[in-house]
Amino acid sequence: MNAPHEECNEVMLSALYRLGFDGLARDLLAPVSRPGAKPAGVLADWEPAEILGGLAILPRFGLQSDAEDFAWRAYLNLPMLTCLHHTELAGGLDVLDRAADLVNRLRPTRWMSLSDVCASNVAVARSGSSLLVRPYARRVRVAVEPTATEIIIDTPPSDPAVDVRVTCGPAAEVGTFGSRFRFAGPFSGVVAIEMGAPDPVDVDAVPARAIRIWPVLRRMMTEARDRLAPLPDRIRAGRAAL
């Protein structure tokens, strides 16, 4: 999910969490290239995602973001989501090539879909026969060696704190974000882990809203405005060429 114009209040976050969205992508509020944007300092709160109202918030970057931001996230092995607005392609598609070249130079890099980014957005550490897992999305997948006898799921803190239902394979427990959940083995292969709402809402059970004319007209006017925006420049360029 991408928040339109970066606007997403607590009610919307709660709804997305209960509806089972894997996460939300939005612009990074405090990139490392702007030290004054984060009061606690640029080295604070740098994790693969932030949990707000139970929903994982993954930062995204514009195609023309500062290269320092990309390099910093690559160094910390954090996900990098690139985005653009249609106006950024007004000068051609070269901006896409430059962004891809920048990311590819930050080896090792693996391009993947948003779903796969969320599924792999997890921190894993081994301690004896226990596997410590901290998910940073609703659903993640973790490769578990046969010698692991226990999986400890360390859920990130959520602001505000909300209840969570943690599943590890077929087992499940309910608690609050910021708590640890222990699941005994045996395990084999890849284990699916999920942090979902204890009171989920089936999207098919939500009644459809009645069709309103104004949103449709507003969308049509916005589309027409954007398509006609380059016209004056083209007319002036044509007159200058005569």
Image (tube, rainbow, N blue to C red):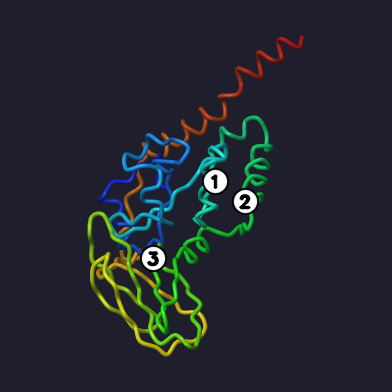
Residue marked by disc 3: 138
Left or right? Give the position of 131 relative to 237. Answer: left
Query: Quick one: label 2 or label 3, which is nearer the N terminus?
Result: 2
Q: Say which element carries label 1.
A: helix
Residue that numbered label 1 is attached to: 70
Q: Give percent across and percent down for residue 133.
A: 40, 72
Judged by depth in the image, the label closer to the viewer, 1 or 3, is 1
Query: Given the image, on which type of amino acid does mark 1 rest?
Result: Phe
Q: Find residue 24 and report its horizontal and vertical position in percent.
A: 40, 53
First reached walking from the N terminus: tag 1 or tag 3 = 1
Q: CA distance from mark 2 to mark 1?
A: 8 Å
Q: Is residue 94 above or below residue 57?
A: above
Q: CA distance from mark 1 to mark 3?
A: 24 Å
Residue 129 image position (x, y, % from top left): 42, 84
Q: In which image quadrant can residue 112 be found?
A: bottom right
Q: Are marks 2 and 3 in contact (CB under 8 Å)?
A: no
Which one is in front, 90 or 239?
90
CB of mark 2 within 8 Å of CB of mark 1?
Answer: yes
Judge left or right: residue 163 versus residue 4.
left
Query: Which one is earlier in the sequence, the residue at label 2 or at label 1?
Result: 1
The amino acid pointed to by label 2 is: Leu
Dot 3 falls on a residue whose secondary structure is: loop
